[in-house]
Image: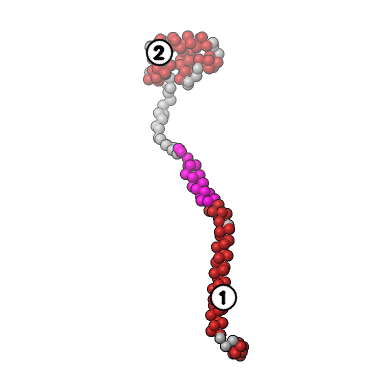
Amino acid sequence: MIRKVKTLLLHFPNYKQASFYGFILALLLIVLRQLELHFLLINHLFELYTAGIAVIFTGLGIWLAVKLTKPAKEIVTIEKERFVDPDPFEIDQNELARLGISKREIEVLQLIAQGLSNEEIADKLFISVSTVKTHSVKLFDKMDVRRRTQAIEKAKRLKIIA
């Protein structure tokens, strides 16, 4: 190996100058590579900008989707302890007698308390709608109320219905 180097030095007496030219040539090759890369970037600049914008908008879209799809309302469950009276409900017969309310009127009042319409009450009791209205009017007169809600409230207060 040393012999080959000595032979080369004999053939190239100006090896310092050759080394310098070799170094310059290597630098030129590096510069040309950089210029080639720069040239490729310039030629494909539109595609690179497009890809960059696509990445930005994709990230923005994902961020907006996460922000906008959060539930607007949260469901909150509240558990509340209620004490139930162990005694079953009993109708106050004295109040019924005092007011003079018949069994049929009590049935109509209980169905009114369930929220049924006159037609639904008539279907349940197998009577006509006008009969339901008659029972309601008599019931309201006996209880001294003007509306269904007042009748329900007063009946619960007097322990006529549950």
Quarter occupied by the N terminus: bottom right
Q: Viewed as shown, does residue 34 lie left or right of 143?
A: right
Residue 148 point in image, percent of width and height:
43, 16
Q: Viewed as shown, does residue 97 lie left or right of 124?
A: left
Residue 108 point in image, percent of width and height:
48, 15
Mark 2–mark 1 distance (CA, rounded to whole Å): 110 Å
Rendered residue at 58%/58% (across/down): 43
Q: Disc 2 or 1, which lies upstream in sequence?
A: 1
Residue that label 1 marks? 25
- Element type at mark 2: loop
Which of 66/113 is in front? 66
Residue 156 quadrant = top left
> Colour scheme in the image?
secondary structure
Which of 143/18 is in front? 18
Residue 67 point in image, percent of width and height:
47, 44
Q: Amino acid at mark 2?
A: Arg
Magenta range:
53-73
- Element type at mark 1: helix
Residue that label 2 marks? 146
Rendered residue at 43%/11% (across/down): 139
Disc 2 and disc 1 in contact, CB within 8 angstroms? no
Instruction: Kindly tell me whether residue 92 is visible in this rendering.
Output: no
Residue 152 quadrant = top left
Crowd band around label 1 with a 10 angstrom C-alpha radius: few (<14), some (14–19), many (20+):
few
